[in-house]
Image (cartoon, rainbow, N blue to C red):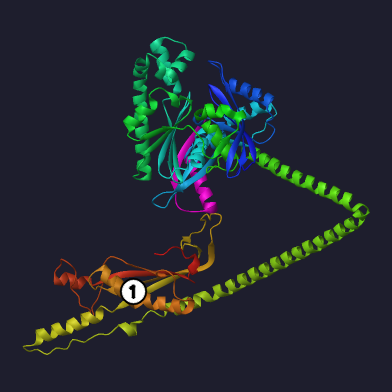
């Protein structure tokens, strides 16, 4: 993050180059020098390099330097990511950048900025990228004048920083900067923002006037901004009207799209920036057709302008992006974007710290000279005191290192002890698991039967029915344990079992001293899977949960034992009359009796020992 006290900022366009020298002034800023150099008509990219050389010959640019690139040079994309922080957020942004930048990552320089939170709680991120080749060419041009860049930002970001710092909007608004070869639209919505480049710019208005009136480019530029005073104002506006309609359509479409992203919001203000914002009839036409209040940005509130920089006051709209980039360099901008190569940023940061160190060193030397002059011959005594102070500092530093070594040793011993205890606990785990399985009710607890011995007589059928009903009630409590498996596994902090060969991401917590227990059995058919699921919970899962709770304490969230009831099956060969047979759906009694008794298979699983509560994941 740049936070210089004073900085030169340069904004190069196709028609002109703007440069300002801006410095901190209390809670605001002050522009102390400024230059605007118009390029010759039809000039190429080399015109900006020549203009920078001209400014460097008139002013000292050896201090901090910020450059604002036209936004058309960059790819801008806005994405949303889940609400995470720290390293995970950086990884997500890096992944999204690869997906949204349609060029090889080694061919671009990119940066990002967190715009704010959406209504759904996600984070909205702005991603900005420029071609490495374009930045390299710019750095080469500046090297010819022995200039080094400390900050490389974009024009639309500078415009946003100026709006946030100087206008301080309290409600959603739109800003449009119309330059000679670009038009930037910025939506400002509290901490959130959104950019779009519009396909209509100042040159389109100029070309339309050239073709209609068969005049030179310079004459058309003059007509574009002075037509209100011309006798042919109506004809000039008639030529420009189709382009104005297209501009209104693009603005309406942009606002509509942003509302579809950000939710319904009311936009009542639009501010015009840029040199072409003075086009005849533009403000009124936009206001009438967009039905919102349109204002031309005419004055600064928190940035002062010295008389020697009066060119800024005369053409404020053209300097808006340049001023915003300067505010970012002073540390007064909300969006901190730097598209310099990483090594260049590190060199700039080192240069900045070097100046601080040199300043402190110079102050120290001044202090030493002061003491030498004041105390004269006592300087030797002062040196002795300084030497003793150095010895005390060395002793304190040695004591600090010794404490650090002791702490490292303590942590190492605790880690070794934890490992030994974990291995010991792991050897006891299978026996403990058997004790947990033993908590399941056994056959003697759940198997009861009623023998049907009914004498012939008038009440034979009703007595038999009563006995069968009682037996059926007892059968609903029957659960068979058919087997169980215990295998040692690795488990993540979220409870997922890692199979052999599974890749483990860096930073992931993995427990490799756990067992996965699977117990299988059958339940007598009680009617449906839901009812059997509840009975399984009462008769099998709850006893196991109680055993785990007694050993490890109650779980913080949900249950630790998973259960699953399968689809109905039939147990073959059930000759015992105590089973109520013949319940197969849609079949006759004889076929059902031969087939067997309807059962529901079940399986329960759990991890032993359980995952610690603070690592066990989210609430279910």
Residue 412 pos. (x, y %): 67, 67
Which quadrant does the C terminus fall into? bottom left
Residue 410 pos. (x, y %): 68, 69
User: In the image, what residue occupies the spot 41% across and 72% down?
Assistant: 484
Relative vertical location of residue 441 with respect to residue 485 in this rendering, above or below: below
According to the picture, the residue beneath numbered tag 1 turns out to be 537
Q: Horizontally, is 16 left or right of 462 in the view?
A: right
Residue 175 pos. (x, y %): 43, 35
The span picked out in magenta is 73-99
Relative vertical location of residue 608 with respect to residue 88 in this rendering, above or below: below
Q: Is residue 285 magenta?
A: no
Which quadrant does the N terminus fall into? top right
Residue 250 pos. (x, y %): 37, 30
Residue at far top of view = 214
Q: Is residue 98 magenta?
A: yes
User: In the image, what residue occupies the spot 70% across and 40% down?
Assistant: 351
Q: Horizontally, is 519 left or right of 594 in the view?
A: right
Q: Horizontally, is 381 left or right of 29 in the view?
A: right
Front residue of 428/584: it is 428
Callout 1: few (<14), some (14-19), or many (20+) C-alpha neighbours within 10 Å?
some
Relative vertical location of residue 158 with respect to residue 442 in this rendering, above or below: above
Residue at far right of view = 377
Does any portion of residue 569 appear in the rendered image? no
- Disc 1 on helix, strand or loop? helix
Residue at far left of view = 458
């Amino acid at each position: 993050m740049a936070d210089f006290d004073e900085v030169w900022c340069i904004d190069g366009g196709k028609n002109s180059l703007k440069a300002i020298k801006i410095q901190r002034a209390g809670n605001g800023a002050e522009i102390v020098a400024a230059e605007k150099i118009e390029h010759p008509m039809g000039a190429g990219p080399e015109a900006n390099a020549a203009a920078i050389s001209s400014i460097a010959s008139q002013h000292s640019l050896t201090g901090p330097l910020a450059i604002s690139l036209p936004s058309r040079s960059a790819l801008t994309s806005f994405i949303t990511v889940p609400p995470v922080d720290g390293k995970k957020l950086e990884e997500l942004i890096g992944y999204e950048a690869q997906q949204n930048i349609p060029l090889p990552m080694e061919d671009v320089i990119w940066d990002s900025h967190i715009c704010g939170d959406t209504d759904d709680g996600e984070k909205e991120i702005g991603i900005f990228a420029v071609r490495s080749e374009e930045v390299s060419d710019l750095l080469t041009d500046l090297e010819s004048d022995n200039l080094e860049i400390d900050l490389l930002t974009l024009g639309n970001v500078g415009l946003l920083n100026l709006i946030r710092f100087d206008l301080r909007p309290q409600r959603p608004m739109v800003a449009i900067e119309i330059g000679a070869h670009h038009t930037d639209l910025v939506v400002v919505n509290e901490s959130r923002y959104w950019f779009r480049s519009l396909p209509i710019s100042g040159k389109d208005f100029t070309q339309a006037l050239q073709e209609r009136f068969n005049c030179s480019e310079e004459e058309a530029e003059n007509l574009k901004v002075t037509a209100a005073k011309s006798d042919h104002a109506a004809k000039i506006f008639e030529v420009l009207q189709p382009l104005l309609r297209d501009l209104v359509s693009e603005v309406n479409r942009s606002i509509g799209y942003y509302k579809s992203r950000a939710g319904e919001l009311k936009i009542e203000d639009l501010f015009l920036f840029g040199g072409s914002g003075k086009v005849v009839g533009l403000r009124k036409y936009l206001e009438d057709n967009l039905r919102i209040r349109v204002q031309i940005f005419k004055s600064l509130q928190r940035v002062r302008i010295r008389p020697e920089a009066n060119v800024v006051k005369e053409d404020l709209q053209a300097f808006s992006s340049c001023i915003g980039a300067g505010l970012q360099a002073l540390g007064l901008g909300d969006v901190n974007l730097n598209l310099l190569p990483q090594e260049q940023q590190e060199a700039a940061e080192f240069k900045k710290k070097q100046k601080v160190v040199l300043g402190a060193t110079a102050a120290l030397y001044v202090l030493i000279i002061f003491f030498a002059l004041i105390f004269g011959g006592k300087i030797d005594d002062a040196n002795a005191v300084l030497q003793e102070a150095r010895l005390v500092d060395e002793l304190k530093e040695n004591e600090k290192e010794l404490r650090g070594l002791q702490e490292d040793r303590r942590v190492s011993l605790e880690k070794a002890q934890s490992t030994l205890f974990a291995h010991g606990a792991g050897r006891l785990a299978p026996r403990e698991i058997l004790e947990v399985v033993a908590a399941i009710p056994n056959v003697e607890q759940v198997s009861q039967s009623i023998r049907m011995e009914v004498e012939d007589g008038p009440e034979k059928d009703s007595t038999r029915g009563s006995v069968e009903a009682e037996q059926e009630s007892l059968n609903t409590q029957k659960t068979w344990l058919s087997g169980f498996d215990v295998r040692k596994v690795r488990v993540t902090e979220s409870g997922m079992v890692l199979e052999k060969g599974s890749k483990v991401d860096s930073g992931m917590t993995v427990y490799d001293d756990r067992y996965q227990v699977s117990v299988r059995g059958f339940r007598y058919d009680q009617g449906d899977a839901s009812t059997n699921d509840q009975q399984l919970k009462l008769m099998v899962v709850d006893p196991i949960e109680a055993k785990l709770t007694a050993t490890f304490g109650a779980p913080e969230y949900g249950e630790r034992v998973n259960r699953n009831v399968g689809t109905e099956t039939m147990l073959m060969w059930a000759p015992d009359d105590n089973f109520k047979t013949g319940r197969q759906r849609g079949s006759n009694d004889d076929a059902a009796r031969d087939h067997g008794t309807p059962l529901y298979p079940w399986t329960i699983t759990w991890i032993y020992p359980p995952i610690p509560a603070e690592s066990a994941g989210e609430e279910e």
